[in-house]
Amino acid sequence: MAEKLHVVMLPWIAFGHMIHFFQLSIDLAKAGIKVSFVSTPRNIKRLPEIPPSLADLVDFVEFPLPSLDDDVLPEDGEATVDIPAEKIEYLKIAYDLLKHPLKQFIADQLPDWIIINVIPYWMVDIARENKIPLILFSVSSAAAFVFLKHPRCLIGDGQKRLRPSWMSMTSKPKWVDFPSSVAYRNDEAIGVFEGIYGENASGITDGERISRVLNGCQAFAVSSCAEFEGDYVNLYERLIGKPVIPVGLLPQKKPERKQFTDGRWGGIFKWLDDQKSKSVVFVGFGSEYKLTKDQVYEIVHGVELSGLPFLWALRKPGWAIDDRDALPSGFRERISDRGIVCMGWAPQLEILCHPSIGGSLFHSGWGSTIESLQFGHALIL
């Protein structure tokens, strides 16, 4: 009997990335492919459990996150959600140090494929040295990559000609040859431009990371579907001259709810069960987005004035002393008959697939967008 195909998955240590890589790992395992999912110990402990029927096909492989001098990262800071936004550039430094143990791991395992995102650019050389094909898996949209055009446009003179400033990102690119209104708003363009092309403590811009991985990969997989942005998928394939594979909306099946029958979430799901179909607004701004006090208070006013039942998943902001300090005094009491604010982690997929949820108010993150679309919800961005 032929040996099973073996794939190594290496996501960036942000939960928006890790969850999508995990979901793709499960789908690959269902197809009979052996998967080694690589991350740090604390991150792996926070991922969902592997279905028992796939336990022999999916292995979690732990590598401790290398420490940095001067305690620049918190002791348990193994993911972007654990640290302030201004420290993420240092998290990239620690993550890049994983290339040393991973070089030996890949040489020992010799998998059939390696699937990464854009951050571990050094995996291109490791894959090439071991003659292993590499797939870039993006948890962003195909349209976002079309805006970047060709890898050579992400660095040096190519970048300066294509993207001299953030203002160049606020209109439809000339190479988009079909009707589209997709472009960045001013505030979005400023953040994206700085995030991709700006210098950071790791010594390499995100644009250069993306360029190196795009040049070194054999195929580009994207968390999207042809029905939603097929024109962008086809255009990007022409732009980079490599296969662009839409993997579809993940997960492909509704998650089970059995693990939430007890405790706090058992009570919250019981409350959802008591609401009318499609009547509840789910409010959630993801694990990465850091809300200011003004933003939290604006959301408070909005959900209160709406008069609609709602479930709000809110992580304690850095400016709040504790969970109660994150919300205006008296707010919980005023909305107690029609709304719940749950602090900390929330099982977003299980919430979104509940029949009482009718719409989602969120930060326009691509992962949340495709999850909400998958369950047929109205989007409030």
Image (tube, rainbow, N blue to C red):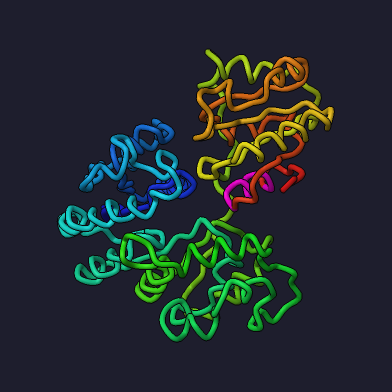
Is residue 324 inside the magenta stretch?
A: no
Residue closer to the observer: 103 or 326: 326
Residue closer to the observer: 73 or 233: 73
- Establish if 204 lies above or below 307: below
Q: Tell me if residue 31 can be seen.
A: no
Q: Quadrant of residue 156?
A: bottom left
Report whether 246 appears left or right of 185: left
Find residue 11 and report its horizontal and vertical position in percent: 38, 52
Which residue appears at 66% of the width and 40% of the height? 295
Q: Quadrant of residue 309?
A: top right
Q: Which residues are magenta?
A: 366-373
- The majority secondary structure of the magenta stretch comes to helix
Which residue appears at 65% of the width and 51% of the height? 364
Report whether 70 appears left or right of 202: left
- Establish if 189 lies above or below 271: below
Report whether 154 appears left or right of 266: left
Is residue 368 inside the magenta stretch?
A: yes
